[in-house]
Amino acid sequence: MTELSKHDPITIYIKPTTGFAALNLRDLWTYRELVFFMIWRDIKVRYKQTALGALWAVIQPVMNMLVFTFLFDRIAKLPIDGDIPYPLFSFAALLPWGMFSTALNAASRSLTSNHNMISKTYFPRLVLPMASVLGGLVDFAIAFVILIGMMIYYGVTPTAHIWWALPAFLLLTILTALGVALWLSAINVQYRDVGYALPFLTQFWLFITPVAYSSSVISGNWQLLYSLNPMAGVVNGFRWALLGIGTGPSVELWISVVIALGVLITGLVYFRNMERTFADTI
Amino acid sequence: MTIAIKVENISKRYKIGTAPGKFRYGMLRDQIAAIPRKLFRRNEGQAGIDYIWALKDVSFDLEEGRVLGIIGRNGAGKSTLLKVLSRVTEPTRGTVAVRGRVGSLLEVGTGFHPELTGRENIFMNGAILGMKRAEIAAKFDEIVEFSEVAQFIDTPVKRYSSGMYLRLAFAVAAHLEPEILVVDEVLAVGDAEFQRKCLGKMNDVANQGRTVLFVSHNMSAILRLTQEAIVMQKGQLVKRAPTSAAVDFYLASGQAQAGERAWEADEVSPNAAPFRPLSLRVKDQRGSVADSFRSPEPVTLELEYRLSAPITGLRVGIYLSTVRGEYVFTSFDVDQPDLYEQYSTRQPGHYVSKCQIPGDLLNEGRYILGVNASSFGVKRYFMDENALAFNIDPMGAPGMQWAEQRQGPIRPRLDWVIETVKK
């Protein structure tokens, strides 16, 4: 007999679940391999039947950087802090931003694009948005190589904080993207309006995040409101750790963290509440 | 024995319009527009929303290692029951305790990605079904061999034929080795050879002492694979019995009395018009309706129906099959050329088509009558493959001096002659 039948099978109770009791993280842990399989599948499939393949992970942020440099540096002549060249200044922000927007878009559509799996088999539905968000890390890693090249080219040395700060800010990016995506993906199951609102939302979010411009152009009174956007904290954090711009983590960052966690926790609860009917409504 | 599945009073309610298969996405706009109404008319909050109970207070226990068949007409709640048991959807009320991992064959090939190769999809699909990577690797060769696609294992599955695709998908699911296997109509697809292989595999699973729940419309498959079955009707469990008794009960359900099947207006699809079946009866020699006949006596069939408009080329007939699903014969009321000429266009009216199955034809056993009304090559107005069942008793049949069961569905009385050959 197989490995499986050696240990005594556990008993599962199926019943109507309510609110918080329904989170069931243990189940998610049993299905952890599926998360990796989903990430692996998404990556394998993402650039299939494209001529340029994984180059797209580089082309997208580089093109964005070129457009930003042309528009905001050459034409609008936006002031930036320090003597960092504008291409590097914008690319350091485009990295986490690209990660965030790809993750948000993929994860928000993750349930509807896998509706077959949901209506036919059981697995913790959280696997889908989680895998989509984490899948963005691969593109991030590829684009990061370009950033290293640019830093060498421009002769900019990163600060000593890079070792803890980059992973920490990357984690904040992931948590923010996951939190928002949990809300949006669950709403999308019932209301396909999300699909139409997403491009607009992403674009709007880009404008309120200091990717193309410096956060120092935001004047005093607006700063607090600005820190409500966790991605502003992330972008500033990246520039600080990589290029030495700004003062590093401040009170505003902690507001960002609290906001991100708040969205994530409410998102989890909402997602779990809706999860019960995904198979019926999708 | 240990209980593998304990189902207690489960019910599942669907809002009409969100029931599976009827896609209707809610509009955010509608919800928002409904807010003031909800605020001011709290008590009527539920008014205007229609619900249907796909499952209603279903309870049963199943011991480990048993194979349970689930039968019922379309919409009786069979698939919803399996969906609840395999945790695809939550019950509205009630609880289920399941001992062990539930593997579901609700639909084979779920999660197959067309761009991935056969090899990649095996791992992917295994993971979706809850297998660990090492488990899949250990089973890999067996899966490939069962699926017969070894040659194309590194080709993207989008280039597979539908048969190859299906074989691979079933192979993965069948090798999942869960403690409990849930199978829903997988046999409706694939060629005969592959179906036989699947049935064989399911038999193995059951013989290894694992619990199997099997839904099918194929009575012969149910009879062959299960010892026990439950019958679902309108979301309720109406019968649990040894399979042959459950199949009989299912076939007899809907009959006004034994030996007669009447169709109510709501049982007939509007597509049948202008044909409207009324009833099917089987009668003995004395002309009384019965459900048991002796093998040597003739059986009279009467099919009563109404036509609300003329139909050209209409033929009304029956299929006779055994409960194992083998056809014995098919016959139509206008098989004779002269009758066909006479009724080339059948006028509106109330009709009875009658015929007689001669005595000394059918062997002992249980038979199923199906009904078909169609114009050949034009339209099938009505069909009910399980309209009525009746028994044939061997009393008085040839060869009764031996207490043995005769093979085959027919038992003709042949005029044997024994000649002594002289030297």
Image (cartoon, helix red, strand yellow):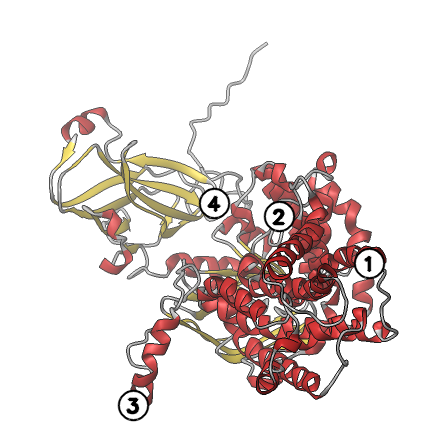
To which residue does mark 4 refer? B325
Residue A154, numbered label: 1
Q: Earlier in the sequence, mark 3 or mark 4?
A: 3
Q: Which percent across, then down, holds residue B317?
A: 29, 39
Neighbor class of circle 1 (other Cα within 10 Å; few <14, some 14-19, many 20+) is few
Q: Chain of mark 4?
A: B
Asked if the residues shown at circle 2 and circle 1 are in contact, with their CB atoms under 8 angstroms apart, the answer is no
> Residue at 62% of width from left, 36% of height from top?
B159
To which residue does mark 3 refer? B40
Cα distance in 3D space between marks 2 and 3 = 58 Å
Q: Does residue B313 appear to the left or right of B392 in the view shown?
A: left
Q: Earlier in the sequence, mark 2 or mark 3?
A: 3
Q: Earlier in the sequence, mark 2 or mark 4?
A: 2
Q: In the depicted view, which residue is nearer to us: A233 or B187?
A: A233
Neighbor class of circle 3 (other Cα within 10 Å; few <14, some 14-19, many 20+) is few
Answer yes or no: is residue B1 visible.
no
* Labels 1 and 3 share a subunit: no
Q: Amino acid at mark 2?
A: Leu
To which residue does mark 2 refer? B199
